[in-house]
Image (cartoon, coloured by chain):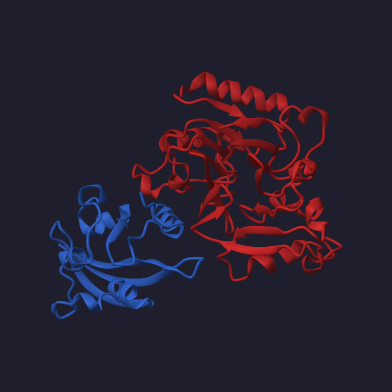
Amino acid sequence: MAGRSIEIILSRQLADCLNVPVFIVDPEGNLLFYNAAAEGLLGRRFEDTGEMPMEMWSTAFHPTDENGKSIPPNELPLVNATKNQVPSHKSFWLRSLDGKSHNVTVMAIPIVGRSQEFVGAMAIFWANTTKA
Amino acid sequence: MKVILHGTRGAYPTSTPDNQKYGGDTPCIELIHNDDRLIIDAGTGIIGIDWNQYDPTKRLDILLTHLHMDHIQGLGFCKPLFDPNREVHIWGPGGSIYSLQTRLNRFLSPPLFPVVLRDIPSQPEIHELSNTKIELGPFTVHSSFIIHPGPTLGYRVTCDGKSLTYIPDHEPMIGRTKLYDDDSWVSGFDLAYETDLLIHDSQYENEEYIRKIGWGHSSMQISAEFAARTKAGRLVFFHHDPAHNDQHRSSTFEAFMSKNSFDFPIELAVQGQEIEI
């Protein structure tokens, strides 16, 4: 079996220790893990959803701008960090699976390992406000 | 394939009388298959290798897991390196801002050592490894980065249908009480999966580990859990803490084994021990 790269494993261990929401994806953008804080934001446990392809997670939470206009996947920080391997930052709204809307600020960074290999990306979310 | 444990102690060498049972030299193991030999790590244990058993016309390969002092301290005293007619290859972790050669130079140069690496008579060739597979004579070597501070590799060596996995310094989980349920998230899993012999870090007692989380080492409990998850055939507890004498190490091991049950044999590494795989 193909194990995760050590940089991704360590990123998950860091995420496990943080009380801010963290998402981790592989080089193709597949969502590999989100931590307990992100579960609160998304309204669904990682154990229940498991891994998700980019096409699914990038639309499942209905990201919108401040005017309620849908944000296309390519404009999401984590998608941008993954596809273009650059850091990316944005504030927007998302709707969790339990129906709540959250205004979040997201910082996403590519994860480049010791061998200069791009092994995935990580996004850290900051929840600004929540509306029922 | 035969494995000889030339150095089993972690951190620093110790020569006190109460540390003689398990040995005081730092990590070095030797793999032997017919006339072919392979050395992993160059702690002070490398000094005890019987070089008369080596064919001087054959190349010598030394694999390093990482560059912490206890794993390279014997390199400057490794006799074949000072033979100008000897072909020596040193393999170790790449993946740093600085090359492996540059990092080795920090140790093999004044004021820490009188001879600089470029002046060592054998002119060893330095090779960087990452998540790699290489063939060295009859030995197939898989290397993979594992969790330990600084670039650190674990090795799986296969020869004649048998396998050895050597992960002397390893903290497979940090800030957790158990390994992840999904095997793909366990550091070093592929290296150790169904290996015949696993030589693994077990420096700490369980209580001690709690005070030293993040230092890069395992307890006996973590080591055994890792071996059980990877379905290793046999486990050797390695990298003994030099702060614990033989009596302490033995009693800790006996207490651990009396409270736990595993379906594979576990033993404490003993310097000079020869294991046939």
Give me the chain that's red. B
**Viewer-nearest residue: B198 or B134:** B134
* Residue B8 seen anywhere in this rendered image of the structure: no
Q: Is residue B45 above or below residue A7?
A: above
Query: Is B260 on the left or on the right of A44, as rendered?
Result: right
Does A94 sit above or below residue B13? Answer: below
Residue B10 drawn at (x, y percent): 68, 42
A56 left or right, relative to B58: left
Image coords of residue A65 (percent x, y): 19, 78
Quadrant in the rendering for residue B7: top right
User: In the orientation shown, which residue stands out farthest toward the top?
Assistant: B258
Q: Quadrant of the N terminus of chain B?
A: top right
Q: x and y percent of residue A89 in the render?
A: 34, 77
State the residue at coordinates (60%, 25%).
B253
Q: Residue at x 41, y 59 (%)?
A: A8
Q: Name the foreground residue: B190 vs B78.
A: B78
- Residue occupying image coordinates x 66% and y 28%: B249
Q: Colour of chain A?
A: blue
Q: Is residue B242 left or right of residue B91?
A: right
In the rendered image, residue B137, in percent from the top left (x then y), is placed at 59, 50
Image quadrant for the C terminus of chain B? Answer: top right
Q: Can you see residue A111?
A: yes
Q: Residue furthest right?
A: B114
Where is residue B93, by image quadrant? bottom right
